[in-house]
Image: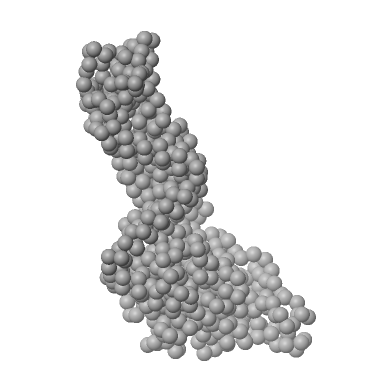
Amino acid sequence: MATEALGSTRNVATAIAAEIMSWNLSLKVGSAIMMAIALIGIFAPWIAPYDPFAQDFEAVLVPPELNHLFGTDNLGRDIFSRVIYGARVDLTIGVITTYVPMTYGVVLGAFCGYIGGKFDMIVMRILDVAMAFPFLVLIIVILAILGPGVQNIYISVFLVAWTMYARLARAEMLVERGKDYVLAAQVLGYPRSRIVFRHALPNVMNSSIVFSMSDFVLNILLVSGLSFLGLGIQPPIPEWGSMIAEGKEFMLQAWWVCTLPGLAIVITGTALSLIGDGLAKRLGERHHTLV
Amino acid sequence: MVDRSHSASASLLEVEDLRVEFVSSRGTLVANRNISFSVAAGETLGIVGESGSGKSVLCRAILRLLPSPPAQQTAKRIAFLGRDLMQLSERQMQEVRGQDIGMVFQNPMTSLNPVWTVGDQISEGLRIHKGLGHSEARRAAVRLLRQVGIPSPEIRVDDYPYRWSGGMIQRAVIAMAMAGSPKLLLADEPTTALDVTIQDQILSLLMELQRATHMSLVLVSHDMGVIAETSDRLMVLYAGQIVEIGRTREIFENPAHPYTEGLLRSIPNVGDKERQLTPIRGQPPDLARLEDGCPFAPRCRHVSADCWTADLQLAEVGDGHMTACLHPERIRLSKTLVDVEQ
């Protein structure tokens, strides 16, 4: 029994290794960078040399040096530590703003495509309305009404961000619906929800997964942008966008205050784009480039 | 109109006056009309007809699988084991589909879901309809795969469909349909997408399974050769209507409809290099613009004035042999003439 379990663990490990070996270069590089960023975020308390909130007025706007790798900001906080803690904040926001809307967007789109008829028409009209508003303006309006903060960012993104996924999933479902395996499932007398969820859904998700990588980057940029405008994450929480916003006044004297958090955003964005690119190639899907 | 002569009590499926319409912007297209036939227990019914003659629509209509809209399906009744399928709720229908009637499709390459293993797909029905546990269902899948002739099924059961060839997948699809031990299997052109040697294997597999389980088989094909080898009775569809139905041997020897006659004349014979094939001239009619009279009249060699106006009914010409032709005697006559020439 024990050896059996050991054997199966080893099998799984070999299977995973083989899977990773078969990835293309951009997928490997992108995943490695993202993995590193995620680990840095998870182990931030052990990696960061300073408390991200600790102010040291003896060392204000110190340029990058050995004690402060990324220098310090106008309140004497260590920017390296803040960027490391920022990975936590930004990745969490990115994951939630991307994958929550993706979940219900894909399910809704898949159902629309499968069922068609009145249900499809109603959902698609709602979708058209949601899409017709300029995204950024809508979010700024919602935040202006509800007030800035992470929760309100979530609410406003959830209202709008599902539309693209619903469109993608619906379009693919229209193709899958006509395939014989869906008909076979009907012939075998499976309930409709089972056919949509278990049979067709895994086949309509490819383009949504690829798109979610670009969307992830856009969402991080969006939150950073909102924070930069003062509508997003409020100081002193170390979020990359709000750090850039705080540093913009000292851009000419102390370039490092806004440049280095910006670099973190760029690296994350690059890694996600690489993953998206690699996935698109691997899943043999049409290329969705947005970033 | 149903052929009751030898199926009064033994018939498994009885379709009476089935009509299927598709409402489109071009108008109403009648894909099936006046369809009445029966399938006896353990019997093989062959259905032939060219593309667009309503063969596949008929199969789907029996299972009530046509999406509505655009399809509209009416029938006096579709009796299966004494129950009228037209009266069943969607939920009851799902039980019939999973257990009593199975179906095999034309294109094996899209019949299996690419993201599931073959074994999972075969055993899924057993898990849903019979409540089997995972390991039990897996054993059943292995058994079914062995039954349809897949070598080393214990290993292949965990394969994904992309690793399998078309013939193997068609076997798996048959296994999937057989999992619920159906009493009736609808095979919608099961061999059309396969090459000739595999065709033969799949057909003999179906025949073998039928003998082993005593199920009835409805075999749809546009290949007269396939039908001749396999079916007990034959139903010929043209423009969505039955034009001739009867025992296969009887129809092959004495076709009583010019369309059937035309189909038989267009079968190439390998041994006989002298004989010219006689194609059926013209095109099948547009089902959205079908006029009164016999739909085959424009292409018929024996057409006469009354063919253009008469209301067509199936009429008996022999024991259980019915034709929609008004003048079946002319075909007999022309056949004799050909025989005399030869």
Return the residue nearer the eye: B201 or B210.
Answer: B201
Q: In which quarter of the image is residue B327?
A: bottom right
Spot the residue most to the front.
A66
Q: Where is residue A206 in the image (x, y as percent from the top left)?
A: 43, 48
Q: Which colour scheme is used?
A: one colour
Q: Quadrant of the C terminus of chain A?
A: top left
Counting the numbered discs, the total is: 0
Please report the residue visible at 33 percent of the width from the left and 37 percent of the height from the top. A38
Q: Tell me residue B242's x, y (percent).
A: 52, 74
Left or right side of B275 for B122: left
Residue at horizontal 41%, vertical 56%?
A: A15
Question: Horizontal and vertical percent for residue A223?
Answer: 32, 28
The residue closer to the viewer here, A114 or B135, is B135
User: Relative to residue B284, is residue B218 depicted above or below?
Assistant: below
Which quadrant of the view contains residue B11?
Answer: bottom left
Say whether residue B78 is visible: no
Position of B263 compared to A144: left or right? right
Quadrant where the N terminus of chain A lies? Answer: bottom left
Do we see residue B9 in this rendering? yes
Closest to the observer, B28 or A291: A291
What residue do we see at 78% from left, 80% from top?
A: B274
Which residue is pictured at 69% across the width and 72% down the height?
Answer: B279
Quadrant of residue B131 within the rendered picture: bottom left
Q: Position of residue A121 (x, y in %)?
A: 37, 45
Vertical placement of residue B37 versus A291, above or below? below
Q: Is residue B274 above or below residue B20?
A: below
